[in-house]
Amino acid sequence: MTSVMTGDHVGEHITVAGVVQGVGFRPFVYRLAREHGLVGHVGNDSTRVFIEVSGPTDQIEVFARRLVDDAPPLAIVEQVTREATAVTVTDEFVIVESRTIPGARTLVAPDTAVCDDCVAELWDPANRRHRHPFITCTNCGPRFTIITALPYDRPNTTMSAFGMCRQCSSEYLDPSDRRYHAQPISCHDCGPVLSYVGEHVVEGGAAIDLARHALRNDQNVAVKGLGGFHLACDATSDDAIARLRSRKHRPDKPFAVMVRDLVQAEELALISSGDAALLESPARPVVLLPARSSTTLSPLVAPGNPMVGIMLAYTPVQHLLLEGSMPPLVMTSANVGGTPIIYRDADVEKLHTLSDGLLTHDRPIHVPCDDSVVRLVGDRLLPIRRARGYAPLPVAMPGARRPVLAVGGELKNTCCIVSGGHAWVSQHIGDMENFETLQAFESTVERFEAMYSVAPEVIAADAHPGYLSSRWARTSGRGPVFEVQHHHAHVAAVMAEHGLDPHEPVIGLAFDGTGYGTDGTIWGGEALIANVDGYERVAHLSYVPLPGGDAAIRNPCRVALAHLWSAGVDWQRGLAPVDALDEIERDLLHRQLTRDVACVPTSSMGRLFDAVASLIGLRQHITYEAQAAIELEIAATTGTPLDPYRFGMCGVELDPGPVVTAIVEDVRRGCSVADMALTFHLALTALVVAVARRIRETRPLATVALTGGVFQNSLLTMACVDGLEAAGFHVLTHHLVPPNDGGLALGQAYIATHRTER
């Protein structure tokens, strides 16, 4: 490029786009410019950081390169543009006021864990912020959950009501200070106030002491975090956890555990270097890890599960709670009965039935946001729930210009806004089963539309006629509705994550529990050839009747009996699913199946996992989604292969009948539950490879996308990746959004955007 030059100086106008607000980018630019002897200014607007700079050509070149190479740790630089301009008539470099302009918006940073520098100050008796529960700086703390508008300045956050004291104001205005324009900046004198509500209300440092005392005495305490309230209790106490499970109506589903540091985490779980990096990352997600065989954790944390979800303390309040000899704490979202996380101060009355005490503060939460959950599958990151620490970072969608809103699915709902080459996937909202979640969904849509100044012209929705999200799309009045088949959206989400050519087809294997098929049945064991233009269903599990819909999903024994019936296997006593029902229930179910009453045909792979778990005696009734499938994976990890099970393959149908028959024979022979579980996983892996090979025989396709909730199964996913790669395929898995229905909105948006652009 050519710069405008006067004497030996040149001038440039530079803009930087990406996650560049709220991450210390302007003071970074200020210090960098002064280091290189440059003059001019830097500022924020609604879309980017803008820089006017003058100085020697060689110094500007180095300066421009370091804008990317040495950017602050929380920054994500997507684009740098440089234009020649007149030399700035000044002898200094300054930071100018932010300004708002119409059009696209800058990328909002997610909330991040309190940084090491702030933690050091938290414990330093000589520091004026010693034990300050809200210590933060430009490199850490709340962002997404406190932003009320853009640009990200203090008046546009929930800190606007807190006036800065003289010392905080001085730091805030000093470009050389680590807290320059740290919008949540505060101290003991001017910040939010912590309080404990029990028999009495106590404020300040004593609030932490009372909360710690309550936790040590087996009480349940509601703790206000970044994106909502947690319910906390001693993770080593059977009594405390049993009381919490009773209050939350959550008898079996595992709880997450919070520890103060990696050392304490390693006492509880086996942690690889990759796991450690995730645990200590600024996102601080819950990481699913193999639990140590001998720990102080109560078995009620994760009943019957050898995995434990662990996260490190990520707020100053949590560090103070876990100080010293405090045990690890259960930290689970404060909600009940599938409702969204409680986050508003106006709703704290709901917490009284869930907890014995309340540790709260007076900084409002504007955006609710649960903890993220991830796991490593080999060396691949697999998101299970994408929320705090990751949302609302966008997925790049080059060429996407028309504003689109995608409303996701029924379970694990997220929404997605597309505009200006980005797809902003929301934080986890929840299961769309009640009015409270619908309200949370509507609020999230409105926030994202306002935050990014997007007025959608197209609404993408699941084709299921009964999904609450799809019904909302059709009645919202926001624009025409573009329906997307459920499993097509799953495959498209993987394509979007990996930046594939949207019109190049891939082999998509979409395995999940439920998805509305174009023939009116329930799909879920699908092999598709797909791109954004459409899909071809080239193979699927053979249909099996699902008797009673949701009743069958809650009772794997009913699904198992349906699979036995379809395979022509008699319901003989001694088989676990047969014995799980009394004679009257069995007779009623048999009449349902033979007369085809209230039976919906399904090709669901998730239901096949349920059936196998029931057949081998693992689980006949569930209390949370995918419980039987999770226990089947757990059992398989300790198994030894038996004689192989084999699926039938006839035309487009993949028949599980031979596998069901073989499992029944092994059950009658008294084979090990673990051995049968592993042999089933190996049979499914062999089927995946065989299907991909068969497709490749007639179509020149070498890329396979694995998607759907079944691929949360680490054992299956790694086996399929290894088998497919050995067969010469390029295998794609999810790494930005979950393979479950939490990724549907991205896939819907990807398809609708590219289809409607044309």
Image (cartoon, helix red, strand yellow):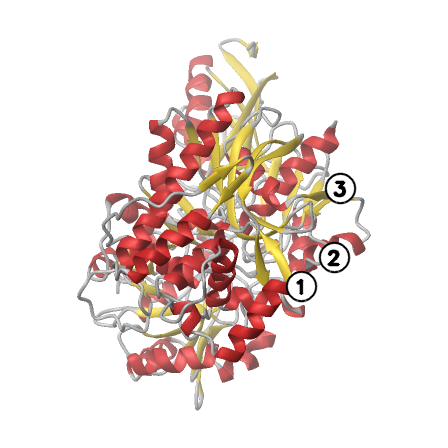
For residue 116, above or below residue 303 = above
**Mark 2: few, some, or many residues within 10 Å (few <14, many ≥20)?**
some
Q: Residue furthest left?
A: 294
Element assignment for label 3: strand
Pick whichever of labels 3 and 2 is earlier in the sequence.
3
* Residue that carries the numbered disc 2 in the rendered image: 472
Residue type at the position of mark 1:
Leu
Viewer-closest of 534 and 473: 534
* Residue pictured at 41% horizontal, 42% vertical: 176
Pick whichever of labels 1 and 2 is earlier in the sequence.
1
| Mark 1 → mark 2, Cα distance in angstroms | 9 Å
Residue 268 location (% of width, % of height): 23, 62
Pick whichever of labels 1 and 3 is earlier in the sequence.
1
Quadrant location of the N terminus? top right
**Mark 1: few, some, or many residues within 10 Å (few <14, many ≥20)?**
many
Residue type at the position of mark 3:
Val
* Residue that carries the numbered disc 1 in the rendered image: 438
| Mark 1 → mark 3, Cα distance in angstroms | 20 Å
Residue type at the position of mark 2:
Trp
* Residue that carries the numbered disc 3 in the rendered image: 458
